[in-house]
Image (tube, rainbow, N blue to C red):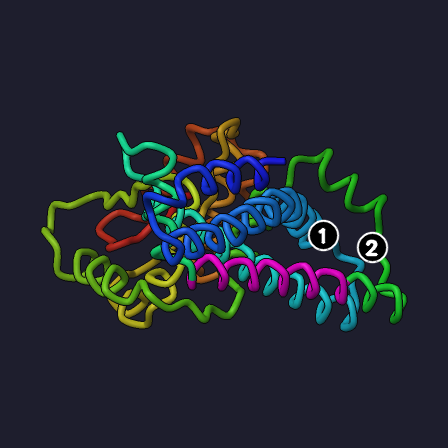
Amino acid sequence: MAEAVVYVVLGKIAASLGRDAINAIGKEASDLLEAENNMKQLEIEFRVMKAFLIQVTMCSSRNLAFDAWLDEVKRVSHDAEDVIDGYEYLLGQSNTQGCSSLKKLWRRSKHAGGWRSITEQLKQIEVRLSKLTNMRDRYGIAINVEEVNHTSQNGQLEHALDSTCINIEDEVVGIEEETSWLVQQLIHGQEERTIVSVCSMGGLGKTTLVRQVYKKDEIKHNFDCSAWISVSQSYNIEHLLRELLKQLQEKEKDIPRQVGTRDAASLVQTLTDFLQDKRKWRTMS
C-alpha cells in the first residue's frame, strides 16, 4: 500500500521532474521499501539471536558440533549488526532535517546502489539463518533448555554477551581511521586522563569500534590489565564487581580467589588494592 502511494505521488509530478529522474526515484523507492520491510524482520531476529547467544554460551553441556554451529550463529549475528549499521548510515545520509518527504526521497535516489546492496545483504542473512536452522536439525544439535532456563533464573548472563562480542573474528572495514585515533588517545593521550567515552546514536557501531581497539596488540602491551564489562540498564553492582575481578583473576595471580561471598565494599577494596599504580583499561558497554 505504501509503495502504491509513493508511485501515485511520483506520477503526479512526472511532468516537472522528467522521466529519468522519476525512474531513478521510483527504483529507489522500491529498494528502500524492500530494505525497510526486511530490516524490521532482521531487527526482530537480531534481538532474539543476541538473547539466544547470551543464554547458550553459559551452558556447560555442549559438544564440538554444538560449538561449531554456535560459532556460525555468532558470525551471522555479527554480520547482521554490520548490516543494521549500514542501514542506519544510509538512512542518515538520506534524511535531512527540514526537507520535505519528496526531497528526502530524491536524496535517497543518490544512494540507490547502497540500498540495493543492503537489500541483498538482508536476503543473504535470512538465507544463512535458514541454513543454520536446517543444519541444526540435520546433525541433531540439541540445546539443553532446562540448563538455559536455570542459567537465566540465576542471572548469570551478562558475561556471556561480553564473550560473544569479544571472541568473534572481526572482518570490519571502514573504521580504520576512528580505530587508529582511539588507540592514539589511549596510548599517547594525557597522563591524567581517566576515561574515554565513545558516544553516538544507537546502531552506529560503537561496540564494534571499541572491540577492534580492545583487541589491538599495542593496547595489550601498553596496559597492565584490562576487562570487558557490559552494564545493562538494570544492573547489580556486586555482580559487576565480581565479574571484573573474575576477568582480572584469569590473567593475574595476585588477586584473592574467594570473592563470591564478599559484599560491595570488600570487592571495591580488593580491586583498589590490586589496581594501585597499574595502568589499566576497563571497557563498559
- Residue at screen point 29% across, 33% down: 99
Residue highlighted by disc 1: 56
**Label placed on residue 143:** 2
- Residue at screen point 60% across, 50% down: 160
Is disc 2 placed on a helix, strand or loop?
Answer: loop
Quadrant including the C terminus: top left
Report the front residue among 133 and 258: 133
Label 1 amino acid? Val
User: Magenta span: helix, strand or loop, mainly?
Assistant: helix
**Label placed on residue 70:** none
Q: Position of residue 264 (x, y in %)?
A: 46, 29
Report the front residue among 260 and 188: 188
Label 2 amino acid? Ile
Is disc 1 placed on a helix, strand or loop?
Answer: helix
Is residue 184 visible to the viewer in this orientation of the structure?
A: yes
Q: Position of residue 84 (x, y in %)?
A: 49, 51
Left or right of 210: which side holds 171?
Answer: right
Q: Tags 1 and 2 in contact by the CB under 8 Å rule? A: yes
Q: Is residue 197 magenta?
A: no
Report the front residue among 125 and 2: 2
Is residue 254 visible to the viewer in this orientation of the structure?
A: no
Left or right of 142: which side holds 234?
Answer: left
